[in-house]
Amino acid sequence: MRILILLGPPGAGKGTQAKEIAARHGLIQLSTGDMLRAAVKVGSPVGRKAKAMMDKGELVPDAIVIKIICDRLEEPDCRRGAILDGFPRNLAQAAALDNVLADKRKKVNAVIELRVDDEELIKRIAGRFTCSRCGEGYNDASKRPKAEGVCDVCGSTTFTRRPDDNAQTMRTRLMVYYRETSPLIGYYFCKGNLRTVDGMAPIANVGREIDKVLGEIKESK
């Protein structure tokens, strides 16, 4: 089993890459939010604990989230491996995850940092817009419709922009990332399983670099 974590600030492309990696390598993309909702829905013991806290409007403790993750990793469809989506978010969560995985004789095999230039990232996010009809994504700087004002995919002439896709909001989100999540880069570097990929490269190039890392993991087993 290969367990992979993608690190990088919001907008670095983690979600896009996780989805494509999962499809190419037969891995399962595990979202903590989706797993929490699934555990609550089936009424598992840990799901019932989580539901009681969620019903009160409380945050679900890390211990419960990690238990849900580890239980999910035991299911047959995760036999080839999984990509953790949105977890861990801080050093305490990373250490707790390592301890629980070690008890199950598992480990995080690789952590891939999508390294980006902050100013370019802000421009990338602030320039995003999507087709209102089909959801095709565009960008003011890097991907405008071939015919101005007309969606390449469905021909719609209506587009939308997320209200939080602006420079000021992005700077605030980056501040949270650097304060809470970026220390994980040093943590995993010291553990010897950090790899860095140029997150500003074209999506296909980023994917190829990640594939190389996964190939190295497979060969070293």
Image (cartoon, rainbow, N blue to C red):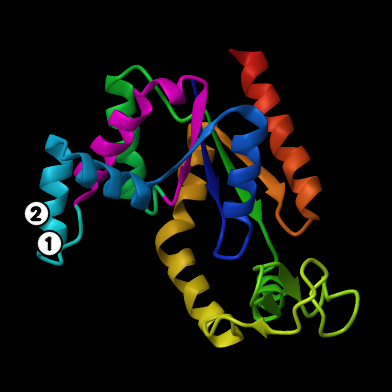
Magenta-span inclusion, residue 70: yes
Where is residue 38? Give x, y as percent: 29, 44
Residue at the spot 83% in from the left edge and 76% down from the top edge: 144
The residue carrying pointer 2 sits among few (fewer than 14), some (14 to 19) or many (20 or more) residues within 10 Å by Cα, namely few
Give the residue furthest to the right. Answer: 147
First to last magenta residue range: 61-86
C-beta proximity under 8 Å, tags 1 and 2: yes
Can you identify the residue that label 2 sits on? 52
Residue at the spot 79% in from the left edge and 66% down from the top edge: 153
Tell me if residue 158 comes above or below residue 66 in the rendering. Answer: below
Where is residue 126? Give x, y as percent: 65, 81
Q: Name the amino acid type tagged 2.
A: Ala
Residue at the spot 79% in from the left edge and 47% down from the top edge: 204
Q: Quadrant of the C terminus?
A: top right
Q: In the depicted view, which residue is nearer to us: 179 or 73?
A: 73
Can you identify the residue that label 1 sits on? 55
Where is residue 49? Give x, y as percent: 11, 46
CA–CA distance between discs 1 and 2?
5 Å
